[in-house]
Image (cartoon, rainbow, N blue to C red):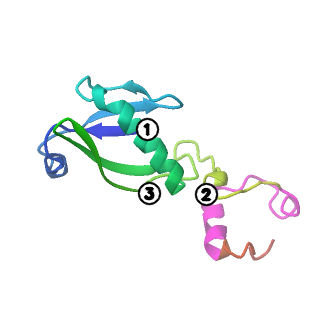
Amino acid sequence: MLGNYVYGLGEQLVSGESNAQIFKLSRPNGKYEGHKELKKYVNKLYKFAVRLEKELGRPQDIEWAVAKKKLYILQARPITTLTSGNLDTYEINETLERDALWVNTNVGEAVPDVVTPFTWSLLRALDIESGFVPGY
């Protein structure tokens, strides 16, 4: 789990007045890597993050604050930047979005080579919900 930390109001970060410090909470135990000022809050933050992910069914973008030495969750929403593909290697893992098993049965003759991410994105755009892909 990656996070950003800025001392003071979040407005400073949004406006560009202040740069965030990055921190990391490693699974499965919440091992902390980051600024020492935040360390006293990370156990509770990690527990909240794991619970929100479990209850809401997917990783969350969590906005939080500390006031008077107490941690508050301001809001949580699904992380929108997660992708089923690795943008560096072009590997696609559709199991991040739904149950999927890739086989080349009945497709191997029509598409004997590797399907590129571009071709696959076109096929998905045609009619991925119905499971019907024209020509296959």
- Assess whether residue 120 is covered by the magenta stretch: yes
| Residue where numbered disc 2 is placed | 97
Quick check: 18 left or right of 131? Answer: left
User: Is residue 64 shown left or right of residue 31?
Assistant: left
Which numbered dot is residue 80? 3
Whether pointer 3 and pointer 2 mark residues with C-beta atoms closer than 8 Å, the reply is no
Could you tell me residue 70's position as x and y percent?
23, 39
Residue 88 percent location from the top left of the image: 52, 42
> Which residue occupies the foreground of this view, 71 or 132?
71
What segment is highlighted magenta in the picture?
104-126
User: In the rendering, which numbered label is found on residue 32?
Assistant: none
In which image quadrant can residue 106 be found? bottom right
Residue 47 disc label: 1
Specify the quadrant that holds the N terminus: top left
In the rendered image, the residue lying farthest to the top is 36
Q: Earlier in the sequence, mark 3 or mark 1?
A: 1
User: Label 1 crowding class (10 Å Cα cut-off): few <14, some 14-19, many 20+?
Assistant: few
Closest to the camera, between mark 3 and mark 1, is 1
Residue 113 among magenta residues: yes
